[in-house]
Image: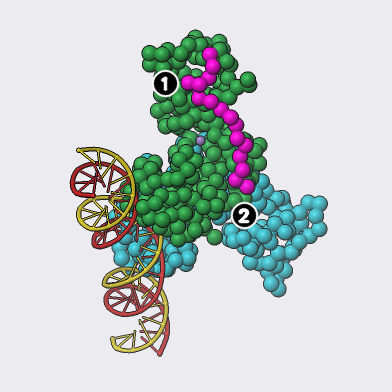
Chain colours: A green, B cyan, C red, D yellow
DNA sequence: AATAAAATTTAGACAAATCTAAAAAATAAA
DNA sequence: TTTATTTTTTAGATTTGTCTAAATTTTATT
């Protein structure tokens, strides 16, 4: 037996899942721009997903995944993030080069494969970008985190996630030696442009823009 | 950039490659039965592969891969066999359950991924079924091997490959504790039905049919 | 409330991969 | 060497996923 849903359908489910995490409900244009496709193509797919009973959808009224749709989406996200972890931890890829490959690997259908992979990797809780990895029941552990703009001055914290995950921001962070797990503190906040000066142990201070700061999440003990 | 050729095209290339290894040239019906599809579908694909300059084909005259087609086929075979090795050696799958999964994994496009995987696995020379793994230039090392029907009596030899790789024969061999690398010798050959009695160290003798014996390959020092 | 703009859906088309049924070509049998 | 059988190809459909252009609906602005 082949895969239950096509790669394309799976990509739509994943995109809708991510968008509805933010806005609760999702629009056609959102999905189109997220997936680099045309609104008409999205509408076509919405009908198919509704027919498959994965989506709550009334035309012109927005839409969201139903329970089954969320379940399927979470399994794809699980696969995506486990494969990313594998690529970084076992095959020595950089965290900024794994997304595209995982975008393909996430569509491999074997459930046994992914559970064995999970075991082989030691049941990791987060992927190389700090995002949580759902378990085989689709549950994940929530971690409270704050972005760098909101980290109090002189509070030491650990990088736990990245918002925007474009190759561009990852390249920038790589260059500044900011990675998942990096311990750092904010030394100065400049009101002029909201840029921030950071200090990482044993390194000279680095400055990042507001745009970057908003996309770096950290956790810290109070 | 996505994959250069569709999964379907890659499956055809691989099937044609295997068939032409045996017969030199390949027929439409051969491919159709190998791939569980219809002759008409094969003809359709042949035209596409010819248009892509991967295949030498004149209608009604048989066909075979050209240099480029062979090159592409060998890279897919390389991926298939490396993934099979990974599944058995790292994820503890049985050798009789990896083929289907590798059938999907072989279509992941990243060249860097497969080269890193090769390195991670320690550059294995053969897959779990004893078949050679091409290197990244498409070369493999030939090993002379003989099937069990032709193994001299009392000559100790090591299982190095399986011909038919159906789940059925693999299940049978599994049950009789015959695996890749097993050292064994032929104790008796029965002329009546060409069945064979084998001895594996520390085990009681087992009997296999001519049909099975023809599909188990071994190597041995003379 | 009427009009303009934006968002969404529909209509109709296309490419890829497959199929069935029928036609054409090659091969085997009489 | 005719005739019959098998193999292969073509013709025409179908399914999935995509697109453009046009129509429809919703939302925002005067
Ligand atoms: Mn994907
Ligand atoms: Mn990730
Ligand atoms: Mn395959
Ligand atoms: Mn194999």
Name the one closer to the observer, C18 or A150.
Answer: A150
State which chain disc 1 sits on: A
Q: Which residue is mark 2?
A: B97
Indicate left or right for C1 with A127 as reference: left
x 45%, y 45%: residue:
A25
The percent position of residue A67, horizontal first and vertical second, equals 55, 52
**Quadrant of the frame with the C terminus of chain A:** top right
Does A138 lie within the magenta span? yes
Is B133 drawn above or below residue A86 in the view shown?
below
The percent position of residue B206, horizontal first and vertical second, equals 76, 61
Examine the residues drawn in magenta and state their main secondary structure: loop
Q: Which residue is mark 1?
A: A210
Res. A214 visible in picture: yes
x 36%, y 41%: residue:
A33
Q: Are marks 2 and 1 in contact (CB under 8 Å)?
A: no
The percent position of residue B211, horizontal first and vertical second, equals 63, 66
Is B20 drawn above or below residue A150 in the view shown?
below
Does A130 lie within the magenta span? no
Q: Secondary structure at mark 1?
A: helix
Name the one closer to the observer, A104 or B33.
Answer: A104
- Same-chain check, marks 2 and 1: no
Query: From which residue to which does the magenta span run?
Result: A137-153
Res. B8 visible in picture: no
State which chain disc 2 sits on: B
Is B155 drawn above or below residue D7 in the view shown?
above
**Quadrant of the frame with the N terminus of chain A:** bottom right
**Tag nearer the camera, 2 or 1:** 1
The percent position of residue C6, horizontal first and vertical second, equals 28, 42
Is A190 drawn above or below residue B13 in the view shown?
above
């Amino acid at each position: 037996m082949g895969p239950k849903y096509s790669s394309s359908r799976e990509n739509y489910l994943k995109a809708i899942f991510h968008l509805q995490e933010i806005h609760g409900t999702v629009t056609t244009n959102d999905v189109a721009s997220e997936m680099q496709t045309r609104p008409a193509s999205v509408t076509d797919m919405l009908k198919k997903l509704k027919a498959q009973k994965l989506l709550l959808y009334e035309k012109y009224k927005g839409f969201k995944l139903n329970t089954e749709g969320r379940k399927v989406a979470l399994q794809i996200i699980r696969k995506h993030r486990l494969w990313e972890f594998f690529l970084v931890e076992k095959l020595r890829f950089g965290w900024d080069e794994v997304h595209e490959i995982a975008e393909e690997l996430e569509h491999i259908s074997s459930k046994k494969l992914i559970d064995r992979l999970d075991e082989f990797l030691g049941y990791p809780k987060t992927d190389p970008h700090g995002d949580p990895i759902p378990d085989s029941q689709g549950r994940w552990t929530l971690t409270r985190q704050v972005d760098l703009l909101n980290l109090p001055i002189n509070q030491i914290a650990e990088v736990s996630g990245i918002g925007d995950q474009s190759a561009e921001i990852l390249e920038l962070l790589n260059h500044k030696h900011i990675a998942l797990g990096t311990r750092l503190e904010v030394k100065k906040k400049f009101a002029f442009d909201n840029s921030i000066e950071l200090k990482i142990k044993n390194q000279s201070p680095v400055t990042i823009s507001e745009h970057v700061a908003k996309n770096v999440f950290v956790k810290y003990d109070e």
